[in-house]
Image (tube, rainbow, N blue to C red):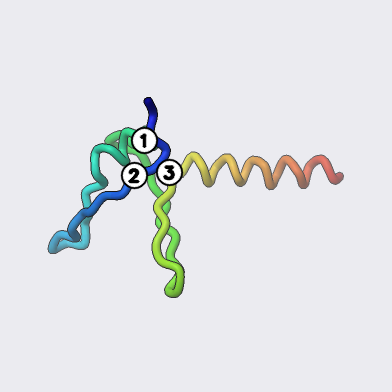
Amino acid sequence: MKKDKYVGICKVGEKGQIVIPKEARDMFDIKPGDSLVVLCDKNQGIAILKSDIIESIGDEIFKSKKEEE
């Protein structure tokens, strides 16, 4: 059975690095060498996304723009 939620704890190292827990890496198919995007909002917190998600959003934006022309 595939889980769709996970809560875990990680510590920040001396250089500001964190280790993403294995369960979360597996859930989002994060592999060594993958690029992640860090989004920050002082009031709402931090979100970490795989860069391919941002790329697909960009593709949709430009696709919509092209269809309007």
Query: Residue tagged by mark 1?
Result: 27
Up-down: is 46 above or below 59?
below
Query: Residue tagged by mark 2?
Result: 6
Q: In whole angstroms, how far apart are the C-alphas of marks 3 and 2? A: 17 Å
Give, as a three-letter code, the residue at label 3: Lys
Q: Tell me if mark 3 has few (under 14), some (14-19) or many (20+) residues whose alpha carbon lies within 10 angstroms of its own.
A: some
Precedes in sequence: disc 1 or disc 2 = 2
Observer-side mark, 1 or 2, equals 2
- Residue at x 21%, y 62% (from the top left corner): 16
- Residue at x 77%, y 47% (from the top left corner): 65
Disc 3, SS: strand
Residue 46 shown left or right of residue 13 in the figure: right
In depth, the one of 15 and 23 nearer the eye is 23
Q: In whole angstroms, how far apart are the C-alphas of marks 1 and 2? A: 9 Å
Up-down: is 68 above or below 17?
above
Observer-side mark, 1 or 3, equals 1
In depth, the one of 8 and 37 nearer the eye is 8
Q: Quadrant of residue 43?
A: bottom left
| Tag 3 near tag 2, CB within 8 Å | no
Q: Tell me if mark 1 has few (under 14), some (14-19) or many (20+) residues whose alpha carbon lies within 10 angstroms of its own.
A: few
Query: Residue tagged by mark 3?
Result: 50
Q: Quadrant of the C terminus?
A: top right
Q: Position of residue 13 (x, y in %)?
A: 15, 59
- Residue at x 40%, y 56% (from the top left corner): 38
Give, as a three-letter code, the residue at label 2: Tyr
Q: Tell me if mark 2 has few (under 14), some (14-19) or many (20+) residues whose alpha carbon lies within 10 angstroms of its own.
A: few
Give, as a three-letter code, the residue at label 1: Met
Precedes in sequence: disc 1 or disc 3 = 1
Disc 1, SS: helix
Observer-side mark, 3 or 2, equals 2
- Residue at x 21%, y 56% (from the top left corner): 17
Residue 55 shown left or right of residue 61 in the figure: left
